């Protein structure tokens, strides 16, 4: 063979050998990178920054379900860096998108579940969770609280049917009474009777409309004003609002329990919720009986219990008693003017404050409704000057002692001093 041909063959052989070696090296490097990626739990660049900028709760977990990175909003669901996933449903979803065989694995999965946001007595929230695989050992979980959205949708579905049914009765009665008044125009006594009934139906219609509006406001997604609220003021306001009702029904309302407790929320909404329970207890209690309102705190939870000695609630009705427009005793509700919305308003008002309502009842023995709200520390109002304390003045000249036989001057004691208050 010629020298040129040998040189070309040698060059070709060198190229083939070099290419083979290079291919082996590249394959080895890729295999090593793949192995490192499969065993590495290092979070990719930029993921932490994205998490910290998210408004929704989001976490990155490894194969042991340990939280490696979390957004600020995730702490509300007890998802903090260094902790583990608290729910079996979250773990199942994370495991579903993580597998070593990427061809057979789902890279993304979504599931709706109920998770508790905050410490008890907060009720579980409806959350849509989306799991995405970042690497064979890392999974991204993004949570979106859809409780309020589902609540609004449910309200929209039920509002037309329930409201039209409930409004039909008073509206029909008003129409019939108006016709009766027109027919009895020449009979003044009958006109007065029909006019009184017409006024009663109009008041019932106004009350029903007002409660529907209050319930709609509580079910709206708008945030309620939050401030430190005294439980004593809530209970006192509710008792004052129903003092006339209790006196008319011959029912004594007794307040007992702890004092000086505080919660956070809207004072007016909470007072209306407690007032609805007191109004129901009075309406369903026989004359001469008593209604108890007790307050206590345990494990950082404030409990406001309203107890009556009325007819009680059957066990079959207790699960539905908080539904809108539901009445355990429709005939009695018509006599007492009930709308079937009072307990529903109580439930939604307490839920909006992160609490819950519990019920104990036995037919013939009465009922106890307990509102449970997260307790807060009493606000620091500082040292306020004591009432009646004034700057020191020069001692006044003592009054002259009257001569013997003349009456001494008397001083009337202020009423407040007799009650133990500072003058």
Image: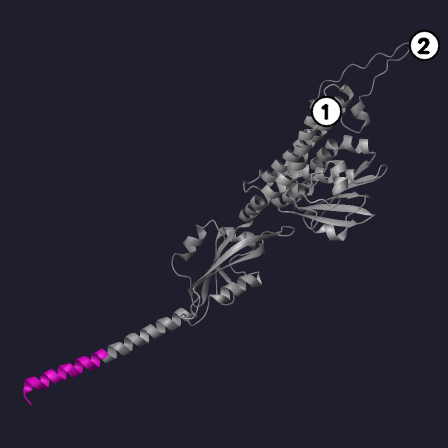
Check the picture and name the quadrant holding the N terminus: bottom left
In terms of depth relative to the viewer, which is nearer, 402 or 100?
100
Q: Which mark is residue 172?
A: none
Q: Residue furthest right?
A: 405
Q: Which residue is mark 2?
A: 405
Badge 2 element: loop
Q: Magenta includes 16?
A: yes
Badge 1 element: helix
| Residue 206 visible from this viewpoint | yes
Q: Is residue 410 left or right of residue 81?
A: right
Q: Is residue 211 left or right of residue 411?
A: left
State which quadrant residue 214 falls in. top right
Q: Residue at x 57, y 63 (%)?
A: 88
Q: Which mark is residue 195?
A: 1
Q: Position of residue 270 (x, y in %)?
A: 66, 39
| Residue 376 visible from this viewpoint | no
Count of number-bearing discs? 2
Extent of the magenta region? 1-19
In terms of depth relative to the viewer, which is nearer, 34 or 91?
91
């Amino acid at each position: 063979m010629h020298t040129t041909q040998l040189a070309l063959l040698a060059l070709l052989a060198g190229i083939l050998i070099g290419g083979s070696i290079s291919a082996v090296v590249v394959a080895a490097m890729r295999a090593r990178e793949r192995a490192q990626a499969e065993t590495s739990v290092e979070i990719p660049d930029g993921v932490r920054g994205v998490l910290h900028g998210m408004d929704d709760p989001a976490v990155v977990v490894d194969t042991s379900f340990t939280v490696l990175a979390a957004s600020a909003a995730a702490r509300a669901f007890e998802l903090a860096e260094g902790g583990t996933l608290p729910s079996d449903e979250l773990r199942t979803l994370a495991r579903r998108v993580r597998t070593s065989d990427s061809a057979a694995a789902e890279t993304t999965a979504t599931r709706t579940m109920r998770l508790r946001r905050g410490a008890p007595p907060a009720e579980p929230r409806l959350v849509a969770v989306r799991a995405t695989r970042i690497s064979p050992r890392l999974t991204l979980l993004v949570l979106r609280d859809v409780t309020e959205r589902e609540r609004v949708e449910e309200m929209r579905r039920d509002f037309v049917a329930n409201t039209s049914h409930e409004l039909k009765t008073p509206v029909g009665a008003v129409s019939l009474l108006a016709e009766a008044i027109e027919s009895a125009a020449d009979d003044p006594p009958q006109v007065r009777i029909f006019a009184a009934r017409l006024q009663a139906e109009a008041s019932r219609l106004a009350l029903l409309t007002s409660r529907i509006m209050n319930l709609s406001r509580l079910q709206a997604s708008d945030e309620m004003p939050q401030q430190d609220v005294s439980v004593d003021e809530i209970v006192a306001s509710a008792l004052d609002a129903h003092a006339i009702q209790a006196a008319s029904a011959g029912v004594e309302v007794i307040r007992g329990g702890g004092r000086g407790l505080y919660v956070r929320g809207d004072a007016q909404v909470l007072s209306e919720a407690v007032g609805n329970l007191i109004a129901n207890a009075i309406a369903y209690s026989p004359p001469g009986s008593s209604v108890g309102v007790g307050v206590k705190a345990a494990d950082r939870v404030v409990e406001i219990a309203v107890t009556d000695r009325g007819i009680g609630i059957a066990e079959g009705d207790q699960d539905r008693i908080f539904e809108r427009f539901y009445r355990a005793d429709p005939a009695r509700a018509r006599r007492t003017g009930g709308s079937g919305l009072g307990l529903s308003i109580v439930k939604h008002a307490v839920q909006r404050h992160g609490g819950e309502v519990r019920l104990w009842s036995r037919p013939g023995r009465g009922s106890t409704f307990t509102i449970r709200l997260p307790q807060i520390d009493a606000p620091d109002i500082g040292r306020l000057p004591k009432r009646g304390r004034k700057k020191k003045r020069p001692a006044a000249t003592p009054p002259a002692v009257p001569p013997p036989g003349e009456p001494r001057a008397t001083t009337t004691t202020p009423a407040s001093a007799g009650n133990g208050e500072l003058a």
